[in-house]
Image: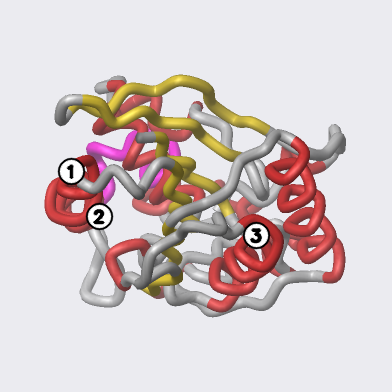
Amino acid sequence: MYIYIMRHGETFWNKEGRIQGSSDIELTDFGVELAELSAEGFYRDGIRFDRIYTSPFVRARKTARLIADRNRSETAPEPFFLVDDRLREMCFGKYEGLKLALLKDYDENIVNCFSHPDRYIPDETGESYEELFARIDDFMMRELLPLEQYAALKNVLVLCHGTVIRAFLQRIDQFDMEDFWNVRQPNCSINKIELRDGVFTSIQKQILYYESEELLHRGIL
């Protein structure tokens, strides 16, 4: 079984370089275009999905729908399109809406969040890395792992967010947390994972069905 873990299209806050997190921000017109280009790319490559999971946030759901409309397998069983709260973006609480380029002007804690994650301590408005990993572990073990027993499920799409994707990849590749934010995930980037005999393995990372040098360096959340 192959699992494609994909980030949503560009949002208005991605474009402005703001911390997004749990704020439910819409796609820009260009974000919709990126999703459509990705749908076309999957189609050209002959990839059809037997199940799609998506974060509840509008930026993820809209991207997922655009993929689903073009790339549903003819033999996909029900349920096909599932919204799962465990895939929501990490909540950054009071820091959401702040500009990433101005982090040095804010308190040391949010600077640590993106440079030394092990030192980040969220207040009551935010979410810890431990909480993020707990729900991603739960999704992998209780939702994805059992799918391997169903022969009808060959390709599964997981549509989510930058921090969430990094959490998935950290669990699969076991890289050090100091490297967490060095894992680049532009809008609509795709990571191909194989699930075989109960083991998740990274096959290909940061697949893009578009070309835009500018987008590779903005909107990390």
Name the spot of residue 125 as percent of width and height, x first: 29, 76
Give the residue at mark 3: 67
Q: Residue at x 77, y 38 (%)?
A: 44
Q: Point out the tag, 1 or 2, that comes first from the N-terminus.
A: 2
Name the spot of residue 42 as percent of width and height, x first: 68, 43
- Residue 6 appears left or right of 136: right
| Quadrant in the picture for the N terminus | top left
Question: Could you tell me which secondary element the residue under label 2 belongs to?
Answer: helix
Circle number at residue 149: 1
> As displayed, is residue 100 above or below residue 178?
below
Q: Nearer the viewer, residue 220 or 152?
A: 152
- Residue 34 appears left or right of 110: right
Query: Quarter of the image holding residue 142?
Result: bottom left
Q: Nearer the viewer, residue 21 or 156?
A: 156
Circle number at residue 132: 2
Q: Residues within 10 Å of mark 2 (few under 14, many from 20)?
A: some
Q: Amino acid at mark 3?
A: Ile
Q: Amino acid at mark 2?
A: Leu
Query: Which residues make up the magenta segment?
Result: 112-121
Q: Residue at x 73, y 48 (%)?
A: 38
Question: Could you tell me which secondary element the residue under label 3 belongs to?
Answer: helix
User: Nearer the observer, disc 2 or disc 3?
Assistant: 3
Q: Residue at x 45, y 43 (%)?
A: 155
Specify the principal SS of the magenta part. Answer: helix
Q: Nearer the viewer, residue 13 or 108?
A: 13
> As displayed, is residue 178 above or below residue 86?
above
